[in-house]
């Protein structure tokens, strides 16, 4: 096998985006996102027209957030929600982005924008048609629909809203366990691979990565927590996959919810340089990683 160190690999430092770009853990994530963005819109040599009405309105809005504080500020909450929606769309179009290069388009009337986000996010903002969703619309497949109807009648007296709330509650509780979280992460990985029509094998073999992509010789291992005791196990898995399967790329995926401290600890395995073909990423950056590997592979075949 060719020396893995000679392979190009997507570097986590060039792919990863801060978690607060994608999801909110607490008010500090809103603050960090909005403050990071205001630095970019305030740069005279940046990608924004400094005197644009929408850009000016955003800078003024941030000033008011600083004066009032972020912690219990609903306006800041919904403003950050709007920014994340724009970043999600930017990521979908660009694949990868950087706030210092790819500008957002700010509406001139930010107050109306914030109010619109709040309306969509709260119960009062639901359109009447949204509150009367039928079983047929939710479950087009007849067998699944009949099963849902049975469960709804048996456990919730035919109340669809109660049934759906129960399902979501059970999923939330189940994802609090380690095994469920692992499977959830694996399912997300599988979904992102299927979206790109990438064939993969589910290994589940002791000492090998959870998923294997034969066409790229890529092994994907999922971790939902981290401590020093797990380091040896992970290293054994990576070493065995390299040896047994002749891996060209190795990837370790962790949840977006993993603490920054734990993420930096597990990233130390990548930074050690022992595994030249290894990248360690949060699940939200997996799509960008797969797209980058595809570019590398296509470039080598050209």
Image (cartoon, grey):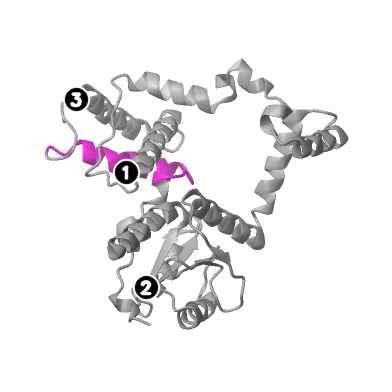
* Kind of element beneath mark 1: helix
Q: Nearer the viewer, residue 94 or 71?
A: 94
Q: Is residue 255 left or right of residue 142?
A: left
- Image coords of residue 51 (percent x, y): 15, 26
Q: Secondary structure at mark 3?
A: loop
Name the residue nearer the viewer: 195 or 46: 195
Residue at mark 3 to residue at mark 1: CA–CA distance: 24 Å
Q: Is residue 53 above or below residue 76?
A: above
Where the N terminus falls, by quadrant? bottom left
Residue range (magenta): 21-44
Direction from residue 116 to residue 39 in the image, left or right? left
Camera-near label (3 vs 2) is 2
- The residue lying toward the viewer, choosing from 186 and 116, is 186
Identified at 71% across, 28% down, the residue is 136
Counting residues from the N terminus, which is met first, the one under dot 3 or under dot 2? 3
Residue under label 3: 52
Q: Residue at x 42, y 61 (%)?
A: 281
Which residue is identified by label 2? 277
Query: What's the distance in space between the residues labelled 3 and 2, CA to CA?
Result: 45 Å
Along the viewing direction, whichever of 10 and 88 lies nearer the viewer: 10
Residue placed under numbered mark 1 in the picture: 94
Q: Left of 166 or right of it: where is 33? A: left
User: Magenta stretch: residue 30 in it?
Assistant: yes
**What quarter of the picture does the C terminus occupy?**
bottom left
């Amino acid at each position: 096998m060719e020396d893995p160190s000679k392979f190009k690999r997507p570097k986590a430092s060039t792919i990863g985006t801060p978690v607060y770009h994608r999801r909110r853990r607490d008010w500090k994530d809103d603050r960090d996102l909005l403050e990071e963005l205001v630095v970019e819109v305030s740069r005279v040599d940046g990608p924004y027209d400094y005197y644009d009405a929408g850009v000016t309105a955003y800078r003024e809005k941030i000033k008011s957030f600083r004066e009032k504080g972020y912690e219990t500020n609903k306006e800041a909450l919904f403003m950050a929600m709007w920014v994340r929606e724009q970043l999600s769309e930017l990521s979908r179009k660009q694949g990868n982005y950087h706030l210092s290069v790819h500008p957002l388009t700010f509406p001139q009337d930010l107050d109306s924008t914030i109010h619109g986000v709040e309306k969509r996010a709260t119960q009062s903002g639901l359109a009447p048609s949204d509150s009367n969703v039928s079983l047929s619309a939710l479950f087009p497949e007849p067998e699944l629909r009949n099963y849902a109807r049975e469960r709804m009648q048996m456990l919730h007296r035919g109340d669809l809203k109660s049934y759906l709330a129960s399902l979501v509650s059970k999923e939330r509780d189940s994802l609090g366990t380690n095994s469920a979280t692992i499977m959830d992460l694996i399912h997300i990985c599988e979904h992102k691979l299927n979206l790109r029509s990438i064939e993969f094998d589910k290994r589940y073999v002791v000492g090998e990565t959870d998923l294997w992509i034969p066409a790229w010789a890529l092994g994907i291992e999922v971790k939902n927590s981290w401590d020093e005791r797990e380091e040896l196990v992970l290293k054994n898995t990576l070493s065995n996959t390299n040896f047994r399967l002749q891996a060209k790329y190795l990837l370790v995926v962790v949840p977006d919810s993993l603490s920054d401290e734990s993420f930096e600890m597990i990233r130390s395995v990548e930074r050690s340089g022992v595994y030249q073909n290894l990248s360690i990423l949060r699940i939200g950056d997996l799509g960008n990683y797969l797209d980058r590997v595809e570019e590398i592979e296509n470039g080598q075949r050209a």
